[in-house]
Image (tube, rainbow, N blue to C red):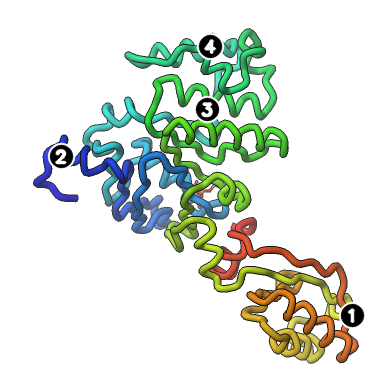
Amino acid sequence: MNDALSGNERRQNDQAAVIRVEGLVKRYGAFTAASGISFEVRRGEVFGLLGPNGAGKTTTLEMIEGLRRPDSGTVIVAGYDTQTELKKVKMVIGVQLQSTSLFDQLKVQEIIRMYASFYPNSVPIRPLLQDMILEEKKNDRVKHLSGGQRQRLAIALALVNDPQIIFLDEPTTGLDPGARRTLWDIIAKLKARGKTIMLSTHYMDEAHYLCDRVCLMDRGRVIALDTPDHLVRNMRSDSAVEFRLPSLEGAPENSPEKEQALRLLQSVSGVKQLEVRGEWYVLYTDRMQETLTNWIETARENSLAFADLRTRSATLEDVFLHMTGRSLREG
Ligand SMILES: Nc1ncnc2c1ncn2[C@@H]1O[C@H](COP(=O)(O)OP(=O)(O)OP(=O)(O)O)[C@@H](O)[C@H]1O
């Protein structure tokens, strides 16, 4: 940061980058949960931290929110330093924690009123309830809400102070597909109103659908940062052909049959990369039709029977696997 800048100048400079994270490090004893995280979040974007469990997403979010103190590094949020100007930061942010412990005995409306009373200015409660699709539940006790309703209440609580920037930590973890879609719609609406949203997730489809830019995290580090489409395109393979080879299932890893099959697969026309995931073989290619037809021909010529053949576009999961050798689900 440029120390010579006054607070006002710094805030103006931060028009584009509403969050600046520089060299964040967090250690828990001998374990380093964040090792030198740096990025910028632009005003009005949905910015996602995507990574498996334990990648350091929550640690990073909570250092940005001022809830955890970094061992080193700086965070500037809307022009304020979270370590020295936390009160000001709190006025412009809304935070939904991974597991917000809500007061089970309170009614939805009561808990929102209570949170609103913590701030000098708060939004009207009725439209907030409507936006979060909780109007019909306003007189229900929190303990009677479904998982999706609780999550929406947690987001409502993060919005009571009309924040510029909203932090959502794994907002859809544990929700059924319908409740996830409802939350996605809510997040898209918040973005359309000009809010900046920073969220963490380990669902690649969620990151792809919601985020303008995605920061891929693994083991406390940023391994890639770009728009979802660019991340996928930079793999230089836009499609995948997947199948199983039943005759090889159960054969030892370095058996001659398996090694020969791998050599064959690598020689298939157009294949840029070959991945083996358990019993599944994945051929990455930019020339889907050529690879598919050549693979079918090769399999026939070599009497190698495949099963469950499917084709698909490459995803952020493929990017993560390509970069780390591990799946987002493995952690
Ligand atoms: N207070 C703590 N004390 C010790 N270790 C911690 C603490 N908080 C987090 N960790 C460890 O730091 C690592 C990163 O945790 P973090 O919660 O930031 O990851 P995450 O990417 O958010 O994953 P998850 O989806 O599981 O929350 C994990 O290995 C975790 O066990």
Q: Earlier in the sequence, mark 3 or mark 1?
A: 3
Mark 2: few/some/many CA within 10 Å (<14, 14-19, 20+):
few
Residue mark closest to the camera, 3 vs 2 = 2
Q: CA distance from mark 3 to mark 2?
A: 32 Å
Pointer 2 residue: 9
Q: Quadrant of residue 252?
A: bottom right
Q: Which mark is residue 155?
A: 3
Q: Position of residue 44 (x, y in %)?
A: 40, 39
Which of 183/86 is in front? 183
* Closest to the observer, 51 or 301: 301
Q: Check disc 2 and give the amino acid type.
A: Glu
As measured in the structure, the alpha-carbon distance from the residue carrying label 3 to the one carrying label 1 is 51 Å
- On screen, residue 26 versus residue 217, left or right, reads left
Residue under pointer 4: 126
For image coordinates 49% across by 57% down, the residue present is 216
- Whole-percent x and y of residue 273? 63, 79
